[in-house]
Amino acid sequence: MNLVNISKEENCYKIKSVKYVKVFGTTLYSYDKIFVKQTESNQWINKNTNKEATQAESLKLDKWLKDHQKFIEKG
């Protein structure tokens, strides 16, 4: 999963990522995932499926948010 975009709306953070499916180093296809996290919540929601993000996805999303939050808050 690779980061595409992070933004902050009124009361939530929104992260767009892309997932690549590769076989022997060749990309077969890719698909976008959009996750939303309310500012007062600790849970990421996948907007495509309206389900909670997996634990692995949540850890990666939280790290991305932590790394980029100071730049998001300025803008």
Image: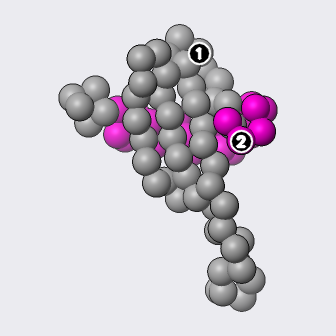
Q: Give the side of residue 33 with respect to residue 50, left or right.
A: left
Q: Is residue 33 above or below residue 43?
A: below
The tag earlier along the polypeptide, 2 or 1, is 1
Work out how far the residue at label 2 is from the one at label 1, CA to CA, in angstroms. Answer: 19 Å
Asked whether the viewer can see residue 24, the reply is yes
Q: Amino acid at mark 2?
A: Asn
* Quarter of the figure with the C terminus: top left
**Disc 1 residue type?**
Ser
Q: Going by the image, does 17 lie left or right of 68?
A: right
- Front residue of this view, candidates 30 and 24: 30
Quadrant of residue 31 within the rendered picture = bottom right
Q: Residue at x 65, y 86 (%)?
A: 25
Counting from the top left corner in percent of width and height, residue 4 is at 46, 54
Q: Which residue is mark 1?
A: 41
As drawn, the label of residue 29 is: none
What residue is at 58 percent from the left and 30 percent from the top?
36
Where does label 2 land, which residue?
48
Residue at the image point whose x is 57% and y is 26% from the top: 37
Q: Quadrant of residue 56?
A: top right
Q: What are the residue bounds of the magenta stretch?
A: 47-70
10 Å neighbourhood of mark 2: few (<14), some, or many (≥20)?
few
Q: State the residue at coordinates (48%, 53%).
A: 3
- Where residue 46 appears, as percent x and y from the top left, is 69, 37
Q: Is residue 16 magenta?
A: no
Secondary structure beneath label 1? loop
Secondary structure of residue under mark 2: loop
Callout 2 touching callout 1 (CB < 8 Å): no
Graded by Cα atoms within 10 Å as few (under 14), some (14 to 19) or many (20 or more), the crowding at tag 1 reads few
Q: Is residue 3 above or below residue 70?
A: below
